[in-house]
Image (cartoon, rainbow, N blue to C red):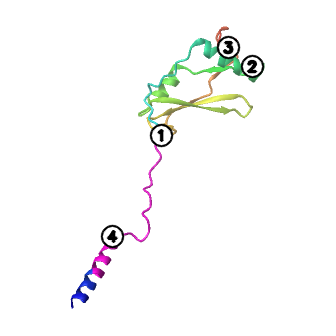
Amino acid sequence: METVNAALSTRTATQDLYVDVPVAPAQPEVRERTRPVFTGLEDHTIALDDAAELTRNYRKSAGKGAIKGGFFGRAALEQVLSQEGVVGIRYYYAQENNGRPVLILVGVDANGKDIVDGFMAERAMPCPPFCSPFNPLNS
């Protein structure tokens, strides 16, 4: 009888080992990829010499008569920035049907998401013809 009890005891103990073991490995938890957090206080400082070099590089590659830059009025910038949750502005290169390059400005939240259902600014006043007098950034 002791042999039968020992066998039953071993069988029960062995069965208990497998009670909590899943049949297949658990699937990893699916998480949405998170972006870096933007604060609106990022440092975008550039020295005039560096800025002049970068704009000069562009002017050389763009060729004579190319648009050098553009102007957005304060009201448009403030309208983008004043939207709820906006910590900065992202720009997108765009092009008119006639080939003229333009920029699209859109507000960005702290998660780096474009606020596309809000106010966006577009079509800067191009330079040329709306340029500052000659300076290291445009000449």
Mark nearest the camera among 4 and 2 is 4
Q: Earlier in the sequence, mark 3 or mark 1?
A: 1
The quarter holding residue 110 reads: top left
Q: Amino acid at mark 3?
A: Asn
Q: Which residue is mark 3?
A: 138
Disc 2 crowd rating (10 Å Cα; few below 14, some 14-19, many 20+) is: few
Q: Earlier in the sequence, mark 1 or mark 4?
A: 4
Q: Position of residue 78 (x, y in %)?
A: 48, 24
Instruction: Please give left or right for residue 31 compared with residue 2 in the image.
Output: right
User: Quadrant of the image for the N terminus?
Assistant: bottom left
Mark 1 secondary-structure assignment: loop
Q: Which mark is residue 35?
A: 1
Q: Are marks 4 and 2 in contact (CB under 8 Å)?
A: no
Q: Earlier in the sequence, mark 2 or mark 1?
A: 1
Q: Amino acid at mark 2?
A: Lys
Mark 4 secondary-structure assignment: loop
Mark nearest the camera among 4 and 3 is 4
Real-space Cα distance between discs 2 and 1? Answer: 35 Å
Disc 3 crowd rating (10 Å Cα; few below 14, some 14-19, many 20+) is: some
Real-space Cα distance between discs 1 and 4? Answer: 37 Å
Report the magenta residues as a range.
10-35
Q: Position of residue 48 (x, y in %)?
A: 59, 12
Q: Which residue is mark 4?
A: 20
Q: Which residue is mark 2?
A: 60
